[in-house]
Amino acid sequence: VSAEGARPLEPSEDEDVLAEEALMQQRTGQPMDPQSAVEVRGLVQTFRSFFPKWDKERKTYAQKAPYHAVKAPQFAIKRGQLFCLLGPNGAGKTTTINMLTGVLPPTAGEGLIYGETVTHPAGMARIRRSMGVCPQFDILWSSLTAREHLEVFGAVKGMSVSDARLEGARRLEEVRLEADADNLAGGFSGGMKRRLSVVIALIAEPNIVFLDEPTTGMDPVSRRQVWDVIESAKQGRCVVLTTHSMEEADILGDRIGIMAKGRLRCLGGGVHLKSKFGAGYQIGVLAPPSSMDGVKEAFKELLGVEASAQSERHAAFSVPPEKEGLLPSFFNEFDRKKESLGVESVQVAMSTLEDVFLRIAKEAEEGENAGKTFTVMAPISQMPVQVMMGDTRVLEAGGERFQVVWGIDEEGNFTPVDVKPE
C-alpha cells in the first residue's frame, strides 16, 4: 500500500526506538519472527482533505496540507505479552489500532499479525477469525441482554450454542455482571457497558485481543476486577491495550510504547522508562517558614540540589538519577539536623509513569510548536502574561515571579494547567 507523500519520515531520537526500528527494517520482506504475535513495519495513516481552506494572506482558497496521523512506527509484540500503547489525544494510538484491526486501510507500510498481513483483504479475514476487539466506544444492541450479546458474538466466531452459553456465563461472572445477565444492555450504566464490551472481546478465546481504553467510566472496584480479567487473559495470547490511566499501564503493561504527534517516542518496560526518563526521586519537606532557608541550605550542601518548588511551609526537591547514590548518606545526615531545623515531615516519592508521559508529551509539543506562546494570569497581580511553550519559571514585568505547571488538556494538547507564586 502506498501513496504519494505518504511516508512523513522523521528521525527517531530514542535509542530503544532506534533499535526496534533497525530490527524491523532487517525483517522487511521476511516472514515474521515466530516468537512475535504482531509486527508493525512502518504503518502510515495520512488523511487528505477535499475541502479547501481560506488563505487570509493570499485572499483565496487553498488546498489543506495532508494530515499525517500515524508516522511509520515500527515495533514488535511478543506472544503472551501485554503491550500498552500510551499517548495524549491525537497521538495516533486509536488510528494505529484501527489499521491493525482492519477498520482503516493503511496509507503505507505493513502490519503482520500471526503471519497474516493487515494490508490484504484475505489476510485480514483470517486475522479476524482469531481476534477480539473492545473498541473505544461501546457497540452494543440496546434490545439484547448481556447473555444474548455473548451468545451472538460466540456464534459469529464459530462457537456452538452450548459452548457460547457456558463461556458467556463464565465471562459475565468474571466482571460481576452475572446478576444482570438477562437484563437489556440499553439499561446498563456506562461502566457496565464497558465491562460487557471487554468480555465480548474475550469470547471464543481469541489469539489476539485489542482493548482500546477498556476501563473508561468504571468505578475503582470494577476497574480492579477488569484488571484481573485482563491480566489472566494475556496467558497464551497477545493483548494490545491503549489507556489514559498511567496506573493501569504501569500495573498491566509488560512493555509500554508512548506515542506523540503520530510517532513512537519511547519503548520499554515501566521500570525501564521511569528510570530512563523520570526525574529520579522527589523529596518534599514540611517545616516552619523560619526554617526554610536552613532546609534549602542542607539540601544544597549535602545533595547539591536546589528547591524545584516552594511555598511558605513546604519545599520540594528533585533528585536526578545520577545523585540517587548519595541519598543514604544524605538521609543519615539530614536526620541529625531535622530537630534543630524544626522539620515536621519528609515525603519521598519515585518518578511515576505519569511523569514520563508528561515529559514525552511536552518534548513532542515543544518540538512541533517551538516559539508558541500562551497567555496565563499572574497569580498575585492577576495580570495577563505571555509564556513560551515549556517555560516553568516566569518573571512578570512588574517583578512578580511565578511557576507554570504544564499538563494535557481534554483535547490532548500540552498546555499550562496551573500557576503558582514562587
Image: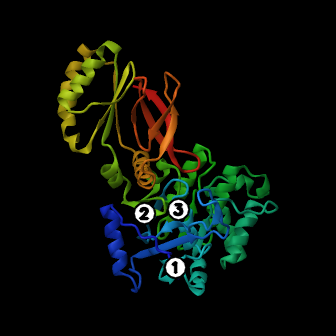
Amino acid at the residue labelled 2? Leu
Task: Kindly identify the residue that appears in the image at 70 percent across and 76 percent down.
Answer: 155
Where is residue 327, by image quadrant? top left
The answer to whether residue 380 is above or below residue 155 is above
Q: Is residue 259 left or right of residue 123?
A: left
Residue 215 appears at what percent x and percent y? 59, 52
Q: Is the residue marked by circle 3 packed among few (<14), some (14-19), or many (20+) residues within 10 Å?
A: many
Check disc 2 and report the residue beneath it: 264
Gap in angstroms between the C-alphas marked 1 and 3: 23 Å
Q: Is residue 177 visible?
A: yes
Q: Are marks 1 and 3 in contact (CB under 8 Å)?
A: no
Quote the CA–CA distance across marks 1 and 2.
Answer: 22 Å
What secondary structure is marked by label 2? Answer: strand
Q: Which residue sits at x=33%, y=61%?
A: 13
- Three-letter amino acid code at disc 1? Glu
The C terminus sits in image quarter: top left
Q: Residue 36: x percent and y percent?
A: 41, 75
Q: Which residue is mark 3?
A: 93
Give amino acid for label 3. Lys
Residue at 37% from the left image edge and 58% from the top image edge: 269
Find residue 266 and report its horizontal and vertical position in percent: 38, 59
Q: Is residue 415 left or right of residue 188?
A: left
User: So how many labels did they put on this image?
Assistant: 3
The mark found on residue 63 in the picture is none
As drawn, the label of residue 4 is: 1
